[in-house]
Image (spheres, rainbow, N blue to C red):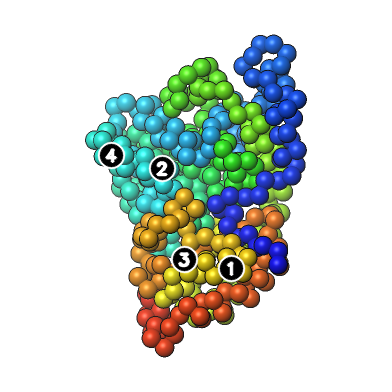
Amino acid sequence: MRPVYLDNNATTRVDPAVVAAMLPYFTEHYGNPSSAHAFGGPSRQAMKAAREQVAALAGAGFSDEILFTSGGTESDNTAIRAGLAANPGRDEVVVSAVEHPAVLALVRLLEGEGRIKAHFIPVLPCGCLDRERYRAALSPRVAVVSIMWANNETGVVFPVEALAEEAKAVGAVFHTDAVQAAGREPIELGGSAIDLLSMSAHKLHGPKGVGALYVRRGFKLAPLIAGGRQERARRGGTENVPGVVGFGKAAEIAAPRLRGDAARMRALRDRLESGLVGRIRHAAVLGASAERLPNTSAIVFADVEAEAIAALLAREGIAVSTGAACSAGSQAPSHVLEAMAIPMAAKFGAVRFSLSRDSDDDDIDRALSALPDIVARLRDRPARAATGETALREVAYV
């Protein structure tokens, strides 16, 4: 049977039009964009066009506010270090407890070195940020705030425009990791208080190994990578021209169809959720009461290990995730589930389904057909039913 791919928050299929746009820059137009001779011209012009395409997707006011990187992780690291450099008299950083490891690992590293004091803002059971704790952490000591646009595991969307305004009121730099949101949610940076925003091409049907960092005009960015004068002296190293071209093309394709694709994915996601919760006892959708990305659903199945569910689904040709792809293989519960205070009976049973514009009704039908039997086979229902029922009754989002 045709494989069913429901792990698009890990990565997406590269659009054939993106591949076609990239190919000439491996062969015919192979010149270095920094070269002054004729071979560099096509590459230079292609990068200029791609910068405009990505800027348009992000609603940036100027194309030169887009800095190309190797991906979301580099963009996040650049943003946080640049935010600290921009506020040398401050030594505190504010992040949410459910940030991507690209943010959390760096913040913990800097804190362990004694360079900063970190505030990890908790979330409520719905996965939403605790706004009171956030406001309490803001002070004139805070150099940079980094709050993700949308969570990669639950899809919960954070009110980053409002959070940025509050951060700016105390003079802090505000960064948001929008890797999961770009190409799935409308982004309008013009007029916002957001200083820095991370994106990654492979989450929106572009190639892996290329990303972008929006840098608000006027912000003095300390480069993470020293070297040549590439990217207006903000990132050294010869540019990945084919990747940048592919990112631009992916952004150009995504922008006009954003709302239509979102509506279609939301309808598919909602049908999947209602079907699974209706057919499987002791199952609940994480963040169901919160605003979420239209393509993302994290569902907990009490008294079942998500790794076992994912393995059996894989045998049926259905690909899902038990959390962030970069955390796969860990035996510990997801830090996102820990932060949401999920009961132990459900903590190891969270499966993430993430759709894309390629997803269709057949994919949902296959998942709905396979999952109830898989969960039933994995459960020792007479021994565990009461445990699961109690666990999910304790969770506020059900």
Q: List x then y, in percent, for residue 267.
A: 66, 64
Which of 86 and 281 lies nearest the eye of the viewer? 281
Q: List x then y, in percent, for residue 292.
A: 54, 58
Q: Nearer the viewer, mark 1 or mark 4?
A: 1
Mark seen at residue 111 = 4
In the rendered image of this protein, does residue 362 appear above or below residue 94?
below
The disc, 3 or 4, on the residue closer to the chain's N-terminal end is: 4
The residues tagged by marks 3 and 4 sit, at their Cα atoms, a distance apart of 32 Å
* Left or right of 346, for residue 119: left
Q: Nearer the viewer, mark 2 or mark 1?
A: 1
The residues tagged by marks 2 and 1 sit, at their Cα atoms, a distance apart of 34 Å
The disc, 3 or 1, on the residue closer to the chain's N-terminal end is: 3
The disc, 2 or 3, on the residue closer to the chain's N-terminal end is: 2
- Residue at point 60% right, 29% down? 240
The residues tagged by marks 2 and 4 sit, at their Cα atoms, a distance apart of 12 Å
The disc, 2 or 1, on the residue closer to the chain's N-terminal end is: 2
- Residue at point 56% right, 78% down? 372
Q: Nearer the viewer, mark 3 or mark 1?
A: 1
Mark seen at residue 307 = 3
Q: Are marks 2 and 1 in contact (CB under 8 Å)?
A: no
| Residue, disc 1 | 315
| Whether residue 304 is visible | yes
Query: What secondary structure is marked by label 3?
Result: helix
